Every structure is written in C-alpha cells, then in structure tokens.
C-alpha cells in the first residue's frame, strides 16, 4: 500500500475524535442538563491525555508503534460503541477518560514513525501537510457531527465515529513499513519512575530559571489565563448553542 496513505491515517482518525467530542458532550448535557457534568466530561478527557503523556513516549520507544496505533484505534472504536447501549453519565466519563488516554498513545506513536517512513529531511514538510489535514478534519468533524446528531441522532454519529477508527486501523494493518527498532523492554514501571523523576528535575530547573527572568513568569501567567479562557469557552459553547435553539443544540454546537 502507498506510504502516502499513512499521511491520511491520523487526520481520518482525528475526524472520529472531533465528531465524538460533539456527540458525547451533547449526550451528556441532554442526559443530565447539568453544566457541571458537562465540565466533568471535558476534564476527564483532558485528564486521560495528561496522564498518558507521562508514559506514552515510553511505550512508543519500547514497543511496536504500528501495533500501538492499530490497537488504540480498535479500542477507541469499541469503547465509543459502548455508549449506545449504556448512555449514562458515569459511562460517558469513563469513555472520555479512555479516549483522552488512548488518543495520546496514537499521536505519539504516529509522530515518531514519520521520520522512519518519509526520511528525516522531510519531517517539516510532512508535519505541515498533516497539520493542514488535521485542520480539515476538525472543520468537517465538528460540522458533520452537529448535522448528523441533530438529524439522525447521537447513535448514528457514534457509529460513524467508530467506523473512522476501524478504517484507520484497517489501513494500518494493510500498510507495511520498516518500523523503528523498539528499545530494550526494561519495564514500564521503571520507565514511569524515570519519567516522574525527570519531570521533577525539569520543574525545579524551570522554576529557578523563571526567578532569574521575571518577563518569562509574566508570559507564563498570560498563557495560564489564556488556557483558562479557552477551557471556559469550550464549556460555554454548548450552553450558548442551547440558548440559540434547544431543539437544534448539536447542530449549532458543531457549527460554532
């Protein structure tokens, strides 16, 4: 199979991620009518991504990255489909957590294989193309999820989400390339401890450096405020969509 197809694997997988972001948030809000539950949905997805960032790189170094991508796609498809028979708030939070967790595994393994497939000299060019394709996925994912959920129901959106993950996994199964040699498998626990120790050392170093450069502290505070504002508007958009037209909340949510 043409290796260029690999470039379209992540954007296609991302399409499912962006679609389920709309569908799951709408499902949670419809099921509970609570902005607190909606905020928890977003928080659990982010928490999964943050926790996986501690050891996703370790897994990508020590195991076959192609298999990691395949299995994370399959896992995401299966867990998304679990929401159809079990659309309760607790299950939604569990699904969001694991979507965030496994999406990080996929992204890290995918990025690590780009130099292996296309060459180190084409990394910037390739990443630029992937970034454009991901932006297209974001637009079509949000709008598509809004329209489909509004007219056909969240079940259809979730089935389509799962289908994008399964197709992405199937393409990866069909593709063959010389993957990077995994490092010695010293054990995930030892790598995890090293990662935590490294984070501690990095934080101390950053803290010491910021004390010497007050302007950097100011910049970081600005970014912190920006991140808070971004999180706030992510929560506010579905509420705004309901205010515009509660009967077409998912449509306006995806459109906004």
Image (tube, helix red, strand yellow):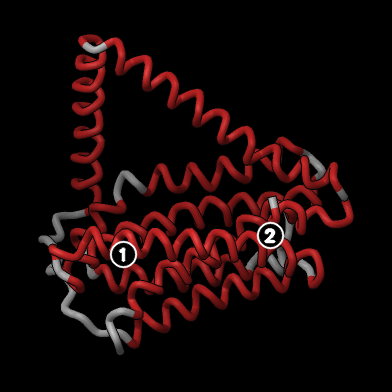
The quarter of the image holding the N terminus is bottom left
Residue at 25%, 10% (x, y): give it.
Answer: 211
Mark 2 crowd level (few <14, some 14–19, many ≥20, 10 Å Cα): many
For the image, the number of numbered tags is 2
221 or 82: nearer the viewer = 221
Q: Taking 134 as reference, is 213 above or below it?
A: above
Quarter holding residue 130: bottom left
Q: CA distance from mark 1 to mark 2?
A: 25 Å
Mark 2 lies on a secondary structure that is helix
154 or 132: nearer the viewer = 132
Residue at 78%, 39% (x, y): give it.
Answer: 34
With 49 as the anchor, is 6 left or right in this view? left
In the rendered image, residue 238, in percent from the top left (x then y), is placed at: 73, 45
With 186 as the anchor, is 17 left or right in this view? right
Mark 1 lies on a secondary structure that is helix
Residue highlighted by disc 1: 110
Residue at 31%, 57% (x, y): give it.
Answer: 108
Q: Taking 205 as reference, is 10 above or below it?
A: below
Residue at 26%, 68% (x, y): give it.
Answer: 65
Mark 1 crowd level (few <14, some 14–19, many ≥20, 10 Å Cα): some
**Which label sits on residue 176?**
none
In the rendered image, residue 221, in percent from the top left (x then y), is placed at: 42, 19
Q: Are marks 1 and 2 in contact (CB under 8 Å)?
A: no
Residue highlighted by disc 2: 23
């Amino acid at each position: 199979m043409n290796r260029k197809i690999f470039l379209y694997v992540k954007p296609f997988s991302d399409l499912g991620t962006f679609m389920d972001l709309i569908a799951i948030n709408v499902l949670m809000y419809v099921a509970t009518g609570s902005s607190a539950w909606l905020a928890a949905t977003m928080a659990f997805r982010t928490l999964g991504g943050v926790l996986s960032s501690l050891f996703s790189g370790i897994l990508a170094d020590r195991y076959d990255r192609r298999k990691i991508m395949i299995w994370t796609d399959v896992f995401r498809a299966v867990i998304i489909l679990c929401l159809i028979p079990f659309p309760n708030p607790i299950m939604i939070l569990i699904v969001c957590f694991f979507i965030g967790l496994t999406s990080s595994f996929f992204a890290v393994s995918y990025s690590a294989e780009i130099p292996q497939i296309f060459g180190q000299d084409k990394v910037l060019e390739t990443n630029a193309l992937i970034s454009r394709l991901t932006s297209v996925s974001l637009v079509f994912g949000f709008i598509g999820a809004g329209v489909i959920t509004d007219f056909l129901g969240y079940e259809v959106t979730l089935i389509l989400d799962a289908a994008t993950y399964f197709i992405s996994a199937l393409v990866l199964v069909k593709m063959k390339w010389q993957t990077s040699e995994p490092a010695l498998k010293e054990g995930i626990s030892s790598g995890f401890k090293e990662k935590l120790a490294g984070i501690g050392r990095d934080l101390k170093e950053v803290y010491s450096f910021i004390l010497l450069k007050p302007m950097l502290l100011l910049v970081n505070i600005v970014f912190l405020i920006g991140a808070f504002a971004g999180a706030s508007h992510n929560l506010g958009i579905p509420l705004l969509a309901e205010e515009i037209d509660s009967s077409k909340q998912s449509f306006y949510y995806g459109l906004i």
